[in-house]
Amino acid sequence: MLIAGAALLACSRNHAPVVGVSCSRSGSGSTLLPTTYTDAVSRAGGVPLVIPTVHTDEEARAVVAALDGIVFSGGEDVDPAWYGETVWNETVEVDAARDTSDVLLARAALSAGKPILAICRGSQLLNVVLGGTLWQDLPSQKGVCHSDVVHPIGLREGCVLARIYGPDSLIVNSMHHQAVKDEAPGITVTARAADGIVEAWETDLVWAVQFHPEKMLRAGDSRWLELFRAFVDRAR
Ligand code: MN
C-alpha cells in the first residue's frame, strides 16, 4: 500500500504539467485561439489544453481543478463596467461572454492557487480582477502609441523577467491600445516602457506581460521559449 502510494506520488510529480489557455469567440460562434499560445506551451514541455467559454463558477472550478497552470490569452478589451467606468470611445471592443468566462476562470485559479501567465488582455484582465483599472485607449487618453511597434522595457531588479533574461532592458513587441492604469492592490509592477506604461507585473501566483512572447517565439526569437519553460516548470 505504501509502495503503491509512493509510486503514485512519483508519477504525479513527473507528469508534464497541463496548462489551459483561455480563448476568444468569433462573431459566428466559434472558439478562437492563435496556435502560437498552445505551440509555445508544447515547446516548453507542457501539455496545452484549450479552454472554451465557461458560464458558471462550478464549471470554472472544475476546469481549473484539471489544470496545473493557466494562460490568459490576448483578445478583446475588458468591459470597463468591470472596473466601474463607462466606455471611453468607439475603439473599445468587448465580448461580454468572454469577460464573464475569464473572470470566473481567474477567480477560480487564484482561489485554487494555480500559477497564471497573463498575456496582453490577460494582464489587463487579471489587474481588473484583483481590483485595478485600465487605460481604455492609450492614444486618446495618454497620447502614446503602443500599436504595431517594438519598444524597450526596463526591468525591476529580481523580477521574473530579470531572473530569466538578466537585468538589462528587453526589446518587446507592442500591439495594445489599453494598459494597466491603477495597479491592483498587492501587485508589483516589474517592467515599464520609457513612457511609463506598465509592461509587466507579478504576484506570488501571477506573471503578467503586456507584450506577446508567444508571437516573438513564433517569429523565430527562441529566447522567449525560456519564459514559457519557466512557467511550465513553475506549474509542475
Ligand atoms: Mn507596449
Image (cartoon, rainbow, N blue to C red):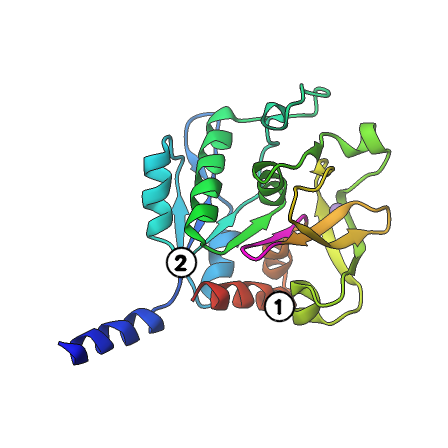
Q: Quadrant of the C terminus?
A: bottom left
In this view, the mark in front (1 or 2) = 2
- Most foreground residue, 211 or 132: 132
Of the residues shown, which amino acid type is indicated by label 2? Answer: Asp
- State the residue position of label 2: 68
Above or below, comparing residue 147 to residue 15 in the picture: above
Point out the stretch of residues depicted in magenta: 203-210
What amino acid is at disc 1? Ser
**Is 191 placed above or below 181 here?**
below
Is residue 205 rendered magenta in the image?
Answer: yes
Q: Relative to 216, is 172 on the left or the right? A: right
Give how far apart the Cα atoms at labels 1 and 2 are: 24 Å
**Residue 73 locus on image (x, y percent):** 54, 45
Magenta stretch contains residue 60 = no
- For image coordinates 45% across by 54% down, the residue present is 114
**Residue 140 visible to an observer of this rendering:** yes
Residues packed near mark 2 inside 10 Å, few (<14), some (14 to 19) or many (20 plus): many
**The N terminus sits in image quarter:** bottom left
Question: Which residue is at 34% across, 72% downward?
Answer: 13
Residue 123 location (% of width, % of height): 62, 45
- For the point 71% across and 68% down, which residue is it? 158
Secondary structure beneath disc 1? helix
Residue carrying label 1 = 222
Residue 44 appears anywhere in the view? no
Residue 42 percent coordinates (x, y): 45, 62
Left/right placement of residue 49 relative to residue 201 reads left
Determine crowd level at label 1: few under 14, some 14-19, many 20+ residues with C-alpha closer than 10 A.
Answer: few
Q: Which of 225/69 is in front?
A: 69
Tell me the SS state at disc 2: loop
* Picture disc at residue 208: none
